[in-house]
């Protein structure tokens, strides 16, 4: 890979990491404000609680479908999670 492509790729990955962290912070803030546990969200979505934790810690990039389900679970708009 040429240096220019590598730089673009690195910038893209940094942007994605920043977006993942923002999503996680927003989810956690909303969840705590509404007194909703990670466990209750996980049960509602039929996923492992650790997956919710990984999202909140910016360690994973959930799909748009999962983001929509998370928003519904915490009774928020998708834009509240991503904005």
Image (cartoon, helix red, strand yellow):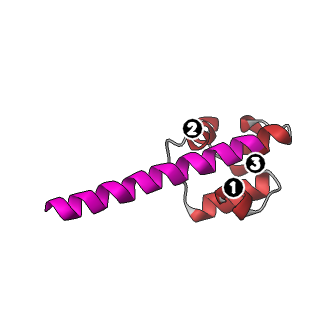
Q: Which residues are magenta?
A: 1-29
Q: Does 25 sit above or below residue 68?
A: above
CA gap, disc 2 and disc 3: 20 Å
- Residue 3 lies in the magenta stretch: yes
Q: Earlier in the sequence, mark 2 or mark 3?
A: 3
Calculate the distance from the C-alpha at mark 3 to the C-alpha at mark 1.
18 Å
Check the image and report above or below for 45 versus 28: below
Would residue 58 be counted in the magenta stretch? no
Residue 43 vs 72, above or below: the answer is above
Whether residue 74 is visible here, answered yes or no, is yes
Give the residue displayed 35% in from the left and 57% down from the top. 11
Residue 25: x and y in percent read 65, 43
Q: Are marks 3 and 1 in contact (CB under 8 Å)?
A: no
Helix, strand or loop status at disc 2: loop
Element on which disc 3 rests: helix
Q: Main secondary structure of the magenta part?
A: helix
Residue at image mark 3: 44
The total of numbered circles placed on residues is: 3
Answer with mark 3 or mark 1, whichever residue precedes in sequence.
3
- State how far apart marks 2 and 1 are (Cα): 14 Å
Residue bearing the label numbered 2: 57
Q: Position of residue 26 (x, y in %)?
A: 69, 48
Nearest the eye: 70 or 1? 1
Pair 2/3: label in front = 2
Label 2 neighbour load within 10 Å: few <14, some 14-19, many 20+: some
Q: Residue furthest left?
A: 2
- Name which of mark 2 and mark 1 comes first in the sequence: 2
Residue at horizontal 78 percent and vertical 45 percent from the top: 30
> How packed is label 3: few (under 14 Cα within 10 Å), some, or many (20 or more)?
few
- Label drawn at residue 81: 1
The location of residue 71, given as percent across then percent down, is: 74, 57
Q: Please state which of residues 79 and 60 is positioned toward the viewer in this rendering.
A: 79
């Amino acid at each position: 890979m040429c240096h220019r492509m590598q730089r673009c790729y690195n910038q893209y990955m940094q942007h994605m990491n920043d977006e993942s962290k923002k999503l996680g912070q927003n989810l956690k803030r909303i969840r705590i404000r509404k007194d909703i546990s990670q466990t209750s969200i996980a049960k509602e979505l039929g996923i492992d609680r650790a997956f919710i934790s990984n999202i909140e810690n910016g360690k994973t990039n959930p799909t748009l479908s999962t983001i929509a389900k998370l928003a519904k679970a915490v009774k928020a708009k998708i834009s509240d999670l991503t904005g």
